Amino acid sequence: GQNIDQPTEMTATEGAIVQINCTYQTSGFNGLFWYQQHAGEAPTFLSYNVLDGLEEKGRFSSFLSRSKGYSYLLLKELQMKDSASYLCASMDSNYQLIWGAGTKLIIKP
Amino acid sequence: GAVVSQHPSWVICKSGTSVKIECRSLDFQATTMFWYRQFPKQSLMLMATSNEGSKATYEQGVEKDKFLINHASLTLSTLTVTSAHPEDSSFYICSARGGHTEAFFGQGTRLTVV
């Protein structure tokens, strides 16, 4: 079957680092996406990993291990505006996205 | 990134009427468009996938006669909610993909049926 798991909610402090984990089981795996979604808005693209390793983009980095079916999104120097839901999605062999339920990230001052 | 424009952003309609939502890719040709529905505090749920010029493929449990999808050109797809009922009230989001790997999302449409 196809399955995506990520924590429901996480809390972190402004200026700190937080890692959001995602595990997946996807047939014909074609890559792993991370999207950010603020309340009431559509998701915005953050990252795409298809090869093992870490991809860094400014304060955000994303990691993938295909053999373990595991990814994480790392957010550094947290800002209050980073409070949002972070959606993990894997792409299957038909190029369709299978979505996780999202991780609500709460940033505290 | 590429721009996808969705219209309207919000709409209120009476029960029994139909509502059309448009999704346009402004600066790329969208060979595939996806329509999602999202209930409060829940994840995106794929409703259907449409490829330009062909019939949409609907996910299990989604009524194709109720949610009419048209993808007549490489830059426009429409979702029509026919005979809307209060339980159809939701956030509807389209996304489009052309030659890119990632899908770009429209702004979403909040539908309220009264």
Image: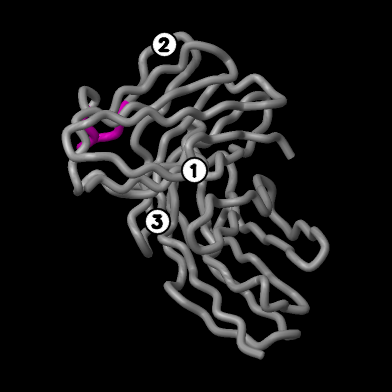
Q: Residue at x 66, y 90 (%)?
A: A109
| Residue A99, percent from left and from top | 44, 51
Which is nearer the N-term, disc 3 or disc 2? 3
Q: Vertically, is A83 above or below B13?
A: below
Which label number is shown at residue B75? none
Q: Nearer the viewer, mark 3 or mark 1?
A: 1
Tell which circle, 1 or 2, labels the residue nearer the N-terminal end.
Answer: 1
Q: Which residues are magenta?
A: B58-63
Residue A75 part of the magenta-drawn span: no
The residue tagged 1 is: B9
Dots 3, 2 in contact, CB < 8 A: no
Q: Where on the picture, by quarter, is residue B58?
A: top left
Residue type at mark 2 is Ser
* Chain to which mark 1 belongs: B
Q: Nearer the viewer, mark 1 or mark 2?
A: 1
Give the residue at mark 3: B43
Which residue is at 72% across, 78% downward? A78
Left or right placement of residue B99 versus residue A57 in this view:
left
The answer to whether residue B62 is magenta is yes
In this rendered view, identify the residue nearer to me: A97 or B96.
B96
